[in-house]
Image (spheres, coloured by chain):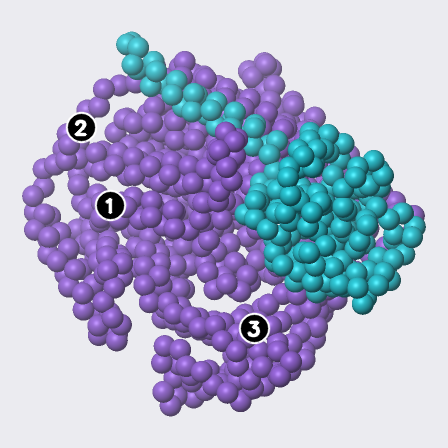
Chain colours: A cyan, B purple
Amino acid sequence: MNLLKKIYFTLPLIIFAMIILILWRGLKLNPAQVPSPLINKPLPHFALPTLFDEKKIVTNEDLMGHVTLVNVWATWCEACAEEHNALLELAQNEHVFFLGLDYKDDVDAAKKWLAQRGNPYQMIAVDYAGTVAIDWGVYGTPETFVLDKKGMIRYKQIGPIDTDSWEKKLKPLIAQLRNEPI
Amino acid sequence: MIPELGHFAIILALCFAILQAGTPLFARFIRNKLAMTTAISQFIFLSMAMLCLIASFMTNDITVMYVREHSHALLPFLYRIGAAWGGHEGSLLLWCLILAAWTVAFILFGDKKLSERSRSHIMMILGLLNCGFILFLLLTSNPFQRDFPSAPIEGNDLTPILQDPGLIFHPPMLYLGYVGFAIGFAFAMAALIEGNCSKEWAHACRPWIVLPWSFLSLGIVLGSWWAYRELGWGGWWFWDPVENASLLPWLSATALLHSLVVSEKRQSFKGWTLLLAILTFTLSLLGTFLVRSGVLVSVHAFANDPTRGIFLLCYLALIIGGAFLLYGTRIKHFYQPPEFTLFSRETFLLFNSILLLTAVFTITLGTLYPIILDALNAGKISVGEPYFNTVFMPIVLPLLLLMGLAPHIPWGKMTAKKTEKKLGVIFLLSGLIAAIAPYSLGFEWHGLAFLGILLSVWIILSTLQYAYSLQKKINLRSLSMITAHIGIAIIALGVTVNKSYSSERQLKISPGESVSLANYSFTFRNIDETHGANYDAITATFDVQKNNDMPLPLEAEQRIYKSNHEVLSKPGILVNPFRDLYLALGNGFSDGAWSVRIYYKPMVRWIWAGGFLLFLGGLLSLFSYWRGRNEFT
């Protein structure tokens, strides 16, 4: 039997092994995590009332001139509860402007939730109808946007922030953004 | 108590599966009895587990986590049975049960002329396969897992989309197909182990490929029909990864069916047949992996857990890797130089295999491409309908052309010249029909429709001509081929006409107004509140009228399920053999108007009718096998 034939006969095994390798790697990836097309673009325009004072309106203007984290959350979101302690710690140790976007939520429930668990946010915008979240391309809670001093989206974290994603991605990025000129 | 009984039954089934896998280790004279006993016990215990699961659903025992996630006190009786396999765990139990059922069928009805050694090898492989699946069930996906809630709670209910009679039939049919290919796989393994693949082997193997293939055809058709009725998009095929996962083994099994005929009748294509038998089951398992591991986003995907993916992938690597390794080392015993001329039926069947495998390859590539790119850190993409339509078409068209020709070509070498002229006439006639038919029915010229009608009519006429040429020699077996080929032609006709001449409108409409689409006028008569067993609905009634015929009522619903407040749009469909009128209700506006989508879908029923013909063709082939068996023994 010549070599060519041997190769031909083991070809199915080789192809199969390659597919298995790719699927193995595929298992560790999350297909639902689609990068935002808005990266390096300004945060789409918004104007929303704040949670604790309906008459006060927060807009893009409030996010200019400093590095900002925007965390999209809701009281009905279990993963948000999971993330909450990490957010409290982060708010205490890091000097960033921290905006919360209360997404499709009951205002009273949100106030109660923050009273019980502590409030990591400097300001909370209320997106009762969920329209601003649609403009921003939010498709699940929690999500966290990192904005630079010009109000551009530089990164979006999908899913809860944990130590791993904080240490590896968010923290270095925030440090870098803080050094950028306005 | 009942869930524990079910759990215990699964463990017992596992023990019997292990024993069955060890069949060849025992003394020759008890092997057959042992295989039969273990297979039947396995089947009995798995049935018992399934009954326990259904019983837990019937009593709505929410301390069973699986029941809590998929049932609700308000869920109608019928859907509680279906809900037993409406999620990952239960459907896996169904999978194991069906594998056991196939094994029992094989031991009871399998060809007795097959050597005792082959039989014990086949039983060993089947035992090994089910060991893996039952272990998977017990270790990662136990449907009887209990959890006692501290406060009384309600079940999560079955997703509204699944609350449809389709759930009762579609998964079992599909699984009968997928899992059935395990027998063909075991046959191939036995042949490789023994280094021998005789005529008797091919003959004994045939029903175990034909029957699962028929079930899979039916399962795919039922799924397509269900999606059409339920999802409200008016589509019948979406190239969703999981749909592809069912199409891939079907294509491969179709190639296998044809290759097996050559192995049986001409003692040729043996290595190829073995490879296709392994590939078909590989694709079945790959489909399972894609659905249950969460590597792809799909409407079908089950909620997932990474350990499941890892287990399945290891299982896949072990079983299929082992099979290909065996193939690579043993196939030299089967290799023989081809002994046929270019114009022979063998060549045509080889083309059939090549084209079908090309289709398998391109669809696999399209389905896995997002994972491949993502795994190589090359970005995130999704591959959709345009890709699949573009690559599938150039493969299918020559396949259809050859289908009309191949039955007329004799085995070995071309001798008959008589048929050539007749076939030429048939082809021209088909072209004529394809050119005239749309005009005479008032449709415009459409290239795709022309090609589709041409090829379908060509297949139907030339197949009928073949049937005619057989005269008295026509038997069940040739009839099965004729039925299945005509089935494919009818599917092709339905698909191309539907693609070419469908039209749709999306609009806002108030009660009393009317709109028109493709010669039909739709008048919005009224809107009403209605109630179902576990949902409230808003029902819109339209009068549909063509010219001045009697208006027909058409009702579309917007359902809100009481348990979880999920909204489901239930389209209204007016059916006749030549067209469907399909209306889906969208959002209501504050001024009393509603957004609706209206579709005109010509010949969409033909697609499913063709699918049923495939199923029928498979059954006919089985009957012919059955009769042949009784005559010879």
The residue furthest front is A181
**Residue in the picture at 36% in, 18% down:** A9
- Give the x, y percent position of residue B595: 55, 75
- Which element carries disc 3, helix, strand or loop? strand
Q: Please tell me whether mark 1 or mark 3 is closer to you in this view.
A: 3
N-term-proximal mark, 2 vs 1: 2
Residue B152 seen in this snapshot: no
Q: Measured from the top left, where is residue B255 in percent x and y? A: 35, 37
Q: What amino acid type should be assigned to the residue bearing mark 3?
A: Leu
Q: CA distance from mark 2 to mark 1?
A: 22 Å
Residue at 66% x, 60% y is A46
Q: Which residue is mark 2?
A: B340
Cα gap from disc 2 to disc 3, whole angstroms: 59 Å
* Mark 2: few/some/many CA within 10 Å (<14, 14-19, 20+): some
The residue beneath circle 1 is: B398
Residue type, label 1: Pro
Q: Nearer the viewer, mark 2 or mark 1?
A: 1
Q: Are marks 2 and 3 in contact (CB under 8 Å)?
A: no
Q: Which residue is mark 3?
A: B585
**Which of the image's four quarters has the C terminus of chain B?**
top left
Whether residues under marks 2 and 1 lie with C-beta atoms below 8 angstroms apart, the answer is no
